[in-house]
Structure formats: C-alpha cells, structure tokens
Image (cartoon, helix red, strand yellow):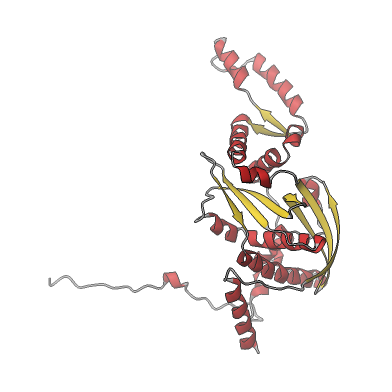
Amino acid sequence: MKLLIRQLENGLINSLLTNNYNMESTFIRSIKYTEVKDSNEVYHANKDYISASGLKKIKKSPLHFMTEEKKETEALSFGSAYHKYILEKELFDQEYFVFDETFILDVLRGEGSLKPRGTNKYKEWYEKEMQAAEGKVMIDQPTFEIIKSMQERLWKHRYVRSLFSNGEAEKSFYCEVETEVGILKIKIRVDYHKKKHRIITDLKTCQDASMGEFPKNAASYDYHIQAALYSDIMKAITGEEWPFFFVAQEKTKPFAFNIFESSPQFINQGRYEYEQLLRLYHFCKENNYWPGYQVFCENKFGIIELKLPAWSINEINFYNHLNK
C-alpha cells in the first residue's frame, strides 16, 4: 500500500512539473469573508487566522510556526516603505518621515563649522525634526531617493502602470473557509487587485530580477504557496479565475524589473503544498500538538537515513608519477 501511495504521489509530482497540467481541487467547498482596509500591523497581529506566511513556516515545521518571532530586518523595513510609496503614495507622508539633514549641514559648513552636528544650531534643528517625526517611521534621505528612483523606473513601463491602476491596494480578506478537513480561518493581504479584470499583482524587491534568478528566489521563498492560496481564495469569493502576477524589482541601480505571470505549474504546485500544509495545520491545532522536523519523518522514532547528495559523490583518482 505504501508503495502504491508513493507511486501515486510521484505521478502527481511529475504532473505538477509540466506547464499544461490543470489540477482540479475540491479542497475549498465554500467561503465566508470580510474585506477590510486595515494596517499591515493589525493584519499580522491577528493570530486567529492562518496566512500564507504562516503556512511557509509550517512547511519548515509546526514547531517553527508556533515559536518563531517576527524580526524587523533592514530588508523588511525597506520593503514596507517601498510598498507604501508605490502602492499607497497618498498615505506615505502620514506614516513615514524622511530625515534629511543635507541642507542644515551645508549651511553650518558654509558658516565654517568643522563639526556641524555638534553645534547648538544643529541640535535645535534636530529637536524640531524629532518632534515633527513623532509617531512616524523614520527613513533617511538616501533610502528615500532609492525608493523614488525605483518608482520612476517602474512607472516608465506602460503595462506596470496598468497593473497598478484602477484597482485597490493593500486590502485584507479574513475568511472562514469550509474545506475537506473542516472550517479553517484563513487570511490574505493582497498588494494590489483589480476586481474588474480579476488580476492580483504582488510587488517584490530582490537582488536579481532576471529570468534566470528570480524563479530561484520564488522557489526558495515559497512564492508559489502565496500565489495559489490568494488566487484560490479570490476564486472562491467571486467564482472567477484570478491570474497572479509578480512585479520583481532590483534594489540597486539601474533598478531593473521583470513582470512574471504565475504559470499553471507554479499555481498547481503551490495549491498542492498549501492544501497539505493546511491539513497539517488543522491536525496540529485539533490535537494541540506542534512537532518539529519529526512530523515529516515516516520512521516513528524520527530516525532519518543519512545519504550523501548526488553532487557530492565523485571519483577520487590518484597517480604514481615517481617512476616517470
């Protein structure tokens, strides 16, 4: 029986690897949802609902999902400011304060100050700036200039402008989804969606947006899980298909970007994974049991046979040259 199951799974995986395979799924049966315009902080603070990010953590292990704390990294901070400026520019000044000391430093240096930041005039100016920035997220001027340049590069492309116009940005959907394993609370936060044309677009920053490299990042960061879950949730809500696009932009000059449309293979693999991970999430929640890596081990003792990866298996040849 186990052999048969493996053969069936292998057949499924092989099918998922082809671009034309269309995996029919009955996992989602019905949905009730609330659509709101809330903040990113409120969305992430709501732990009653499982998100695509949560499923990605469960993919590592349920233990990681339960214990991992979100850390605000420099990359995350930059990404948040970038998203706000690109997608909700009208709200950027309300939430962000750009700290620019260029003018005051030029003035003080022009007055002959060798250490302008140590002067009383600079300290008074700085105090006023901090009062103006109170309650806002602070970014420096060089970072802001990068974000502006990135937007300018994007907006030069007609189709990018089309993807990010006549739609809605940063909407959260809190869903009660009837599935094959029961009612699950699932949340999604869509970067940008166009209801009229039924298009979802996700904005990503990256080091390399080329056709050769970004797909590797998409696989490494499980973007296929996000794309499939979002598309399927929106389909459950509207009854229509929702193509999922990524606009991936590099964070260094010349701020090049690419537009990727999720293929059937990409979506089907993501659907297979999110359904399995939701089953695992439901099992863990029902049993209040959040195991580590052992949950993925078939051996009941959690023992894994250690094998060398194929790339590490090489011949070792040596030659006697003493008599030559």
Image quarter for residue 243? bottom right
- Examine the rendering and report whether any part of residue 127 can be seen: yes
With respect to residue 12, does 136 lie above or below?
above
- Examine the rendering and report whether any part of residue 72 can be seen: no
Where residue 240 appears, x then y in whole percent?
A: 77, 62
Which residue is farthest bottom?
1
Which residue does the image show at 78% across and 49% down from the upper left? 171
Where residue 71 appears, x then y in whole percent?
A: 68, 49
Q: Nearer the viewer, residue 60 or 212?
A: 212
Which residue is farthest left?
324
Assign the C terminus to one quadrant of the image: bottom left
Where residue 134 appears, x then y in whole percent?
A: 77, 30
Image quarter for residue 152? top right
Where residue 124 appears, x then y in whole percent?
A: 70, 17
Q: Nearer the viewer, residue 56 or 288?
A: 56
With respect to residue 53, does 18 lie above or below?
below
Answer left or right for 116 relative to 227.
left
Which residue does the image show at 66% across and 81% down from the upper left? 300
Assign the N terminus to one quadrant of the image: bottom right
Answer left or right for 84 relative to 238.
left
Total numbered labels: 0
Q: Nearer the viewer, residue 259 or 318?
A: 259
Answer left or right for 135 relative to 125.
right
Which residue does the image show at 58% across and 68% down from the upper left? 19
